[in-house]
Amino acid sequence: MLHYTKHFSNNISKLILREHFLRQICRTKSTRRFNNVKDEDDEYHKTRRRCENQEAQIYLLKSRGQHLLMNPRVLNSIVQKSNILPTDTVLEIGPGTGNLTLKLLEVAEKVIAIEIDKRMVEILHNRVSERGLQDRLTVICQDALKTEFPRFDLMVANIPYGISSPLVAKLVYGKNSYRSGTLLLQKEFARRLLANPGDSEFNRLAVNVKLVADVEFVMNVSKKDFLPCPKVDSSVVKIHPKVEIPEVDYEEWCAFTRTCFTKKNKTLGAIFKQKRMLMELMKLQETKGDEEKNTFFSDYHVTDTEDEDGLSNEDTINFSSDVGKDLNLFREIINDILRSGGFEDKRPSKLSHEELLNLLSLFNRARIHFHGQVNPKDGSDAELTSAVGPL
């Protein structure tokens, strides 16, 4: 009897050990799938442990988009796709603790990093000094949107989500000459940036950026590759400035596209029938007429009551009979312009750049402008960013 009891006990022990072993195997495989890395990837685990320790010492602010990219494979891919030459100066926005910076310093002659958080700058300096690369790194501790960019060949950056739109505008409309920009952006923002006429996501962002630059999709990046983990996935895009760009005033163009894309899926005829928009546009022409000592529109009053689209209802606009005549005349001028170019039944979301430029030219030839003051194309970065943004 004792023999059977001992034998039974041994079998139970073996089953427990086997079950424990299977659980360990399953847990290891699950962890591999979750992190998208292999256990032998020492660099990944070492970097992640170091950053987790740093996160315990400094509080990462999600409101500032402080999500550190951890996966070395993604970091290496970004650097590789950027086509960095040994003589290049790379501009990096928001380097954080320097995961991407260290990779860039391995291949570039110089890296200029713009980081507003002084805590991050201190960590970045320490990590770069450990590698003996401090002579090739310049850190500017300022707001990237408010400081003037220094000379650079390439921009490579994991951009904080909150400043993506104005920063892209500053890159493509700024006065810096650059070869390309490789940017890690929120996936939804990247899709909007890549959209073409006729796509459901085609919008003013794509229209304004693609006027002066070409945008190329590089790869998607999982939110699990960041610390802390954001709520959304990301994408890497590459922006190439166009060699030849249209001769157009950028602020006038941006004001024009803002007007057209308020209701991008409506016809232009319907968009330019909205009374509030017509009266604001008419008032702008009156202001320009005053500057030229040639006033031909009267004063008007618009109440503060707006509908859910941000447009005044028809019965909330109060104006005299003289102003009404002026408004009707102005509406007819607009309609004639749209009809002359065959644009009355077309929708902004389906128009190419050539068509939009043609329509703007028709308006300008009729002395109708969308921006109050025409500025030269070599204006400051801050002025152009303000004009374009928010995209």
Image (spheres, helix red, strand yellow):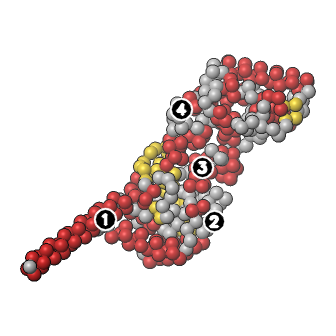
Frontmost of labels 3 and 1 is 1
Which quadrant of the figure contains the N terminus? bottom left
Depth check: give the residue in front, 164 or 131: 164
Dot 4 lies on which element?
A: loop
Give the residue number, with chain letter if any, for mark 1. Answer: 27
Marks 4 and 1 sit apart, C-alpha to C-alpha, by 47 Å
| Tag 2 residue | 142
Q: Position of residue 124 (x, y in %)?
A: 51, 72
Tag 4: residue type?
Answer: Pro
* Residue appearing at x 51%, y 33% in the figure: 199
Marks 1 and 2 in Cβ contact (< 8 Å): no
Q: Residues within 10 Å of mark 4 (few under 14, many from 20)?
A: some
Q: Are marks 4 and 2 in contact (CB under 8 Å)?
A: no
**Left or right, 223 with reference to 292:** left
What's the mark number on residue 165? 3
Image position of 195 (left or right of 315): left
The answer to which of marks 4 and 1 sits earlier in the sequence is 1
Q: Which mark is residue 197?
A: 4
Q: Is residue 97 above or below residue 365?
A: below
Q: Amino acid at mark 3?
A: Ser
